[in-house]
Image (cartoon, rainbow, N blue to C red):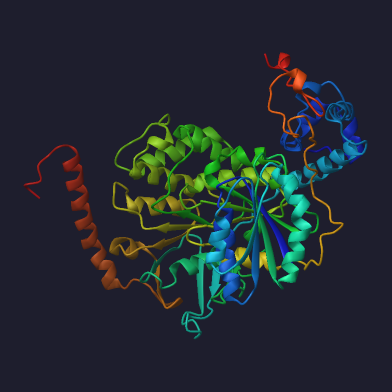
Amino acid sequence: MNTPLPNADQLGTLKVGELQDRYPFAEGFFSSEGFEVLDDLEFSLDEALTRIAHERDEAPTWREGVLARLHVFIAEMLDFVTEEEEHIEKITVRGGRAKDGSAEPVAELTLSVGDVVCLVGPTGSGKSRLLADIEWVAQGDTPTGRQVLVNGAPPDRKWRFSSEHKLVAQLSQNMNFVMDLSVEEFVTLHAESRRAENIPELVQRIWHHGNELCGEPFALDTPVTSLSGGQSRALMIADVAMLSSSPIVLIDEIENAGIDRKRALEVLLAGNKIVLMATHDPILALYGDRRVVLKNGAMQQVITPTPKERENLTELQALDAKLMELRHRLRSGELLEEI
Amino acid sequence: MRFVTVSGPPSTGKTSIVLKAAMHLRDQGVKVGVVKFDCLSTTDDELYAKHGLLVQKGLAGALCPDHYFVSNVERVVAWGKENNLDLLVSESAGLCNRCSPHIKGIFAVCVVDNLSGVTTPKKIGPMLRSADLVVITKGDIVSQAEREVFSRSVGMANPKAMVMHVNGITGQGASELASLLLENEPVTTLSGSELRFSMPAALCSYCLGETRIGDKYQQGNVRHINLDKNT
């Protein structure tokens, strides 16, 4: 959009059709003002508004008011749709205080793109609060007194308040698809809202990754609302990895049911994400680069899996593969007498 | 005293999020009061009272709820002042999406939910479009993709508003909302203040109690649907 935005009076002299071509979103403005101008494409906006003012019995100053509001709306919308995305490399959490007011044992936690960090601790230990602090980009103004830095510096306000810049994308167990769309339509809609390029190819890739993550394939024309639990989660993971605006993905437990968990993490990391997992699954915990132990509302310590633990991972994976195999056999109608 | 108008379509979770935010403020020693505006009946006032908040309710009954709101809001603010509130919240349901209770210079919140469909923000009108803060609820049950699409649709309807997600059940985001509610300039009176958006033109025979259908019973401000163009 290279033409500079005309002032409010000049907007009035534009033909309605021309206005719609230049600023297609203006239609939303008109409908929220309670009228439409679709029948007036050949007329100037001034003429259309004069007609509507007459029909609605509006005061003489009404037209000017509408033009002024329209001008502000278009200016704001142009800012909104052309805003650049900021690239995130790392998020730093500076420790605050525990529930009893004592200093948080972990003074600083840095999360970089490509990290998989697990959060462990009993219910009430402060996992949700830690995530809420990150999501709200806390600046010493939450109950924990923590401070969150983006790329090493105090963040821009947009990370709190803009409709499109949220630090944390969530994938939790009780999430569902509620839109009545096919897989293809659904992913396309998300891609359009993210102003992605080459949408058909992207949709193919997300669908392909989704299928790769779950045991039971689904088609592009399957309605999202009829996907099984495992299929839904697989599609959500692939979609978040490739389309979410948020640099951090929070997963609360990737359930066993039919999801290749290791592959899921790889897909997320390929999308340049920081992955946070609230999990008590030993395999997932050992896939992580680090795990943060929470207690009494504070980060107690950060554990990097030891070589000994890593060795055990192989054994745990073998057990897991065994269970997976039994699941497949069960599904295909076999008896499990020989295991 | 700070004064905030909260509006939003029915069943989006206005009461839940106001209550959750008010609980945080109460715990910090902030005196919060709520006035609930509704049409025919509400029991939300009991809910607020149960949580120890000072509460009043106003039922519009036979009147247009938005007109009823604007005719009473100045008194309501005076009531809050008399009771030495630190924060007064007016909560009203937007029933026809045509209106908005938001007032110039008064912090305006619109509550919408993720389940209402992506075209809803566009349809809501001035209640959402003139709000300073849009709170999106029920985010815990829909996919991340739907949250992002919905949130963008809110941005497309009101690009200048702050947008935040609050969960009315778990309270996630409520303490953050609470701090925003207190960040505003105190008010002394609303006398002379202006609405952000005019109320609908009305006063036809049906406003005055007419119930019979037919052209000969219609008087005053009547507009007819243009059926020809729709074919």
Determine whether, in the image, residue A176 is placed left or right of residue B133: left
Depth order, front residue of B110/A284:
B110
Depth order, front residue of A91/B69:
B69
- Compared to A104, does B5 lie above or below? above
Q: Quadrant of the N terminus of chain B?
A: bottom right
- Compared to B25, does A248 lie above or below? above
Q: Quadrant of the C terminus of chain B?
A: top right
Q: Looking at the picture, how far across and down is residue A146, in whole percent? A: 56, 75
* Residue drawn where x is 75% and y is 22% of the image: B217
Q: Is residue A77 visible?
A: yes
Quadrant position of residue B89: bottom right
Q: Looking at the picture, how far across and down is residue A113, in whole percent? A: 51, 60
Q: Looking at the picture, how far across and down is residue A254, in whole percent? A: 35, 54
All told, the count of numbered labels is 0
- Compared to B180, does B165 lie above or below? above
Depth order, front residue of A62/B64:
B64
User: In the image as oriented, which residue stretches furthest toward the left?
Assistant: A337
Determine whether, in the image, residue A200 is placed left or right of residue A259: right
Q: Is residue A155 visible?
A: no
- Compared to A57, does A268 lie above or below? below
Depth order, front residue of B23/A128:
B23
Quadrant position of residue A221: top left
Q: Looking at the picture, how far across and down is residue B218, in whole percent? A: 77, 23
* Residue drawn where x is 47% and y is 61% of the image: B170
Determine whether, in the image, residue A99 is placed left or right of residue B181: left
Quadrant position of residue A299: bottom left
